[in-house]
Structures are given as C-alpha cells and as structure tokens.
Image (cartoon, rainbow, N blue to C red):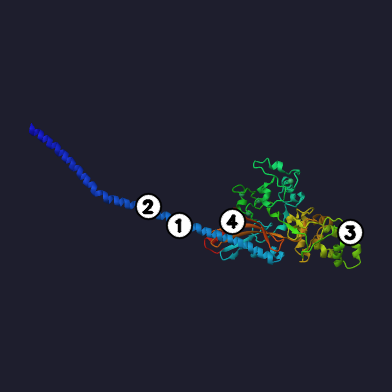
Amino acid sequence: MKQARQTIRENRTGRRAGGRRFRSVRRAGRASLTPKGTVLIVTMWIVLVLAGLVLVLSRSMRVEAIASANYVASVQADVLARAGLQYVIGKLLTEEEETILTESADAYEAIELEKGFFWVLHPNLSDDRNYTFGVTDEAAKINLNSATQEMLLKLPGMTTELASAIIDWRDEDSEITPGGAESEYYLLLEDPYYCKDAPLETVEEILLLRGASTEILYGEDTNKNGVLDPQENDADQSEPPDNKNGRLDRGIYDYVTVYTRQPNVSEDGSQRVNVNQGGNQQLSSLLREVIKDDRYFQLMDGIRDNRPYRNILDMYYRSGLTKEEFEQVADRLTTNSATTLVGLVNINTAPREVLLCLPELTENDADALIAKRANLDETQRQNVAWVTEVLDQEKAVAIGEHITTRSFQKSADIVSVSRNGRAYRRYQAVLDMQNETPRVVYWKSLHHLGWPLDRDLIANLRSGYALR
Ligand SMILES: [Ca+2]
Ligand SMILES: [Ca+2]
Ligand SMILES: [Ca+2]
Ligand SMILES: [Ca+2]
C-alpha cells in the first residue's frame, strides 16, 4: 500500500516534471525564435517607413519645385505685363496720336521679351471673330459723367431706368429723375448704401446703380476680349447666359468711359478766346489774322450782335466766316468758360455706335461722318470744322458742344504670358496725358476672367513649342 502510494506520487511528480519539461522546451523554442523574428519585422517596418518618408519627401519636393517654378513664372508674367504698360507709355510719349491708334496690330501683338510675351488687346467692334490689338482711345466713347440722358439712352441695350439712375447717381441733388433713383431707393436695399451724388470713378461702378446688370454692361462678352468665345455662344450650357445666335451681342462696356477730360486750350497750349464773352481785343486780333479785307469790321459787328453762341459751330454758321477762315481759328475759339472740358467725344475716332449717341444724328449721318473722316488730311483732322461738310447746320450745331478732335486718355488691355506658358496676367490700364508725363489713372487685374486669347498659344508654350 505504501509502495502503491509511492508510485502514484512518483507518477504525479513525473507528470509534473514532464509538464515542466514540456513547458521548458516550449520556453526554449520561444527564446530561440524571438530575437531573429523581431529584428526582421522591425527592419521591415523601418524600411517601409523610410521608403514612405522618401516617397512623401520626394513628392513634396516635386510639389515645391512646381510651386516655385509657377511662382517664378507668375512673377515673370507680372513683370511682362508691367513692361507692356511701359511700352504703351513709351509709344504715347514718342508717337503721334493718329499713328498710335492706327498702327498695325504687329506693334501690339505677341511682343517678345526675354522671359515671355505680351499683347495689347483691343476689341474690334465690327469683328467678333478675330482678336485685334492696339491702344484704345477713351475719347472715342460716351462719358457716363457728362452725357445727357438722351445720349445715354441711345447706347446699345440701355434702359430708361438705368439712364435715369445714372443721372441721379452723379447729380448733386436728391430729386428723382423719372425712372431713376436717389438714396431713398438704395437705402432700402438688403445691403444699403447712399446714392453717390458725385461722378462715377470707374465704369464698373455702374453695377451699383438701379436697373444695372452685367448683361447691360458686358452683354455676352463677359471675358471682355471682344471675341465670341464658345461659352458665349452655347446658350445656358455654361456661364454666361447667351442667345446662341452666332454673334457677340455686346454690352455698353466698350462704348462708355468715365475718364475723358481735356484742358480748354488750343493745340499749342494757349488759352482759347471765348466768343461769348466781352473783351473783344483777343477776338479781334485773332480774326484779323485770317480776315484780310474790309469784311473784317462787318463780321466783327455781326459776331458781337449774334451772341450768345451755343458752341463754335453755331458761331461759324452765324458769323459769316468762310469755312477756310473758320478752319484756321476753330481750335483757338471756345464758348465755354470752364478750364477743363469733360466728356467730349473725338469725332475722328468714335465708332459708329458712339456717333449714333450724339444728338440728332441718324445712321446715315454716322456713316457719312465715318466715310468723310477716312479721307481727311492732317490739318483737317485738327479741328471740328470738317463735320460741316457732312452735316447740315442744325445737326452740326446740335453736336457742337459734345465733340472734339483730340484725346487725352488712352486705355490698354495688357495680356502677358511667361515663356514656359505656366503663368499669365491681364491688366486693364487707363492713362491720362493731360500733363506731359502720362499718368496711370486706373490699373486693375483681369486675370480672374481667364486666358483671353487663343488657347493654342498657351498650350504650345506649355508643351515647349514656339508660340505659333
Ligand atoms: Ca443725385
Ligand atoms: Ca468674349
Ligand atoms: Ca453660355
Ligand atoms: Ca449672341
């Protein structure tokens, strides 16, 4: 019995010992596997993390490289646009006005500099298919600050409501023009503001006015490049809405300005003689220069007796001066005592639509003026006398106080692109040349309107090809 217990104890001990053996074998197995496996796994992880880091770093380096290349390109494009502005200023300082405005497109198209190119875009109002280039004459436009309501109403697409609102916006009083709006209206808007009661400072300011809309201002040409782009002829498929009629229906944007003003002096800068005012000395000596015979005394009496004159064309018709005599003195006469004349339309450069805004002019008159001015010599272009060969007295006198033959403000729509095509810029500049040095009176970026020229140009540059 004792032995049997002994055996059982031994067996138990044996089992226990066996269990210990087994456990120690397991432990031994585990101890021999752990260091090698862990190293391998850790190494793999490190390699994986490092590879990931390298990937991330190289990617961010690439992004950095692209970003800095783009930044360099955008700085280059910006500098190119400013070079374009200086180029235009240089032309204005050194070339005759007529040359500047009639110069061939080559002078303003894809001008090449070391780091890229620039263009001076100019809408051709009778061509909506081709890009045209050049400096724009602001005096070939209707000035929103000086045009009468009747003239404003003749702008293409203008509404009675907006024309009246323009009058109220710029006049100092608070009397509402029929259909117009003063502060009472603007203060009830969701974002209220006062009626300005002062001249507009930019053309876009018109969008603040009652009855104004981007449709009236820009028409279908919302990217302002003067050309019918695909999105401007696909109805409502993409912005902007358009009538898909295959033609660019323009707004008033290309026909209006707020910048035109000029000193009331003659070409050589000397003071003009006011034919409506006393002090006949200056007038006498001026007329003495051109009237050689006895008619002088008779004419002087007549001129004095017929005062006042609406404008110098009115004076011409009622003075008895011959056209040759009038031509010689026209630029040295005035009926306006102001030292600065605002908003005169240059009869030598205004497009048909703008001529049609002048009082009493019909389509035939506008066409006749355009046909006539194409054949004027340099001397004839210097004063307004030539319109009397085209218009009858009533019409010539009606437009007399609204016209000029000189321009002091020019605008330039400058587009530039870096040589690698990565960045482009577009700026609208308005230059005032009333003083000897042209002054930039407006400079606004238009890059947000997108690339305004042929897309192939920029695509070619990006692919490393030549511009065309
Ligand atoms: Ca007002
Ligand atoms: Ca367009
Ligand atoms: Ca559209
Ligand atoms: Ca259309």
In whole angstroms, how far apart are the C-alphas of marks 3 and 2? Answer: 99 Å
Q: Which residue is mark 4?
A: 451
In what element is the residue under mark 3? helix
Q: Nearer the viewer, mark 4 or mark 1?
A: 1
Label 4 vs 3, first from the N-terminus: 3
Q: Which residue is mark 1?
A: 61
Disc 1: CA contacts within 10 A as few (<14), some (14-19) or many (>=20): few
Residue 354: image quadrant is bottom right
Q: Nearer the viewer, mark 4 or mark 2?
A: 2
In whole angstroms, how far apart are the C-alphas of marks 4 and 1? Answer: 29 Å
In what element is the residue under mark 4? loop
Please, what is the three-letter code of the amino acid marked with disc 2?
A: Val
Position above or below: 87 against 402: below
Disc 3: CA contacts within 10 A as few (<14), some (14-19) or many (>=20): some
Q: Nearer the viewer, mark 4 or mark 3?
A: 3
Label 4 vs 1, first from the N-terminus: 1
Count of numbered circles on the image? 4
Q: Which residue is mark 2?
A: 49
Label 3 vs 2, first from the N-terminus: 2
Q: Quadrant of the C terminus?
A: bottom right
Please, what is the three-letter code of the amino acid marked with disc 4?
A: Trp
Q: Assess mark 2: CB under 8 A from ligand 3? A: no
Label 3 vs 1, first from the N-terminus: 1
Q: Which mark is residue 304?
A: 3
Asked whether the beta carbons under mark 3 and mark 1 sit within 8 Å of each other, the answer is: no
> Which of 326/260 is in front?
260
> Which of 268/240 is in front?
268
Please, what is the three-letter code of the amino acid marked with disc 1?
A: Met
Please, what is the three-letter code of the amino acid marked with disc 3?
A: Arg
Asked whether the beta carbons under mark 4 and mark 2 sit within 8 Å of each other, the answer is: no
The residue depicted at 8 percent of the width and 32 percent of the height is 2
In what element is the residue under mark 2? helix
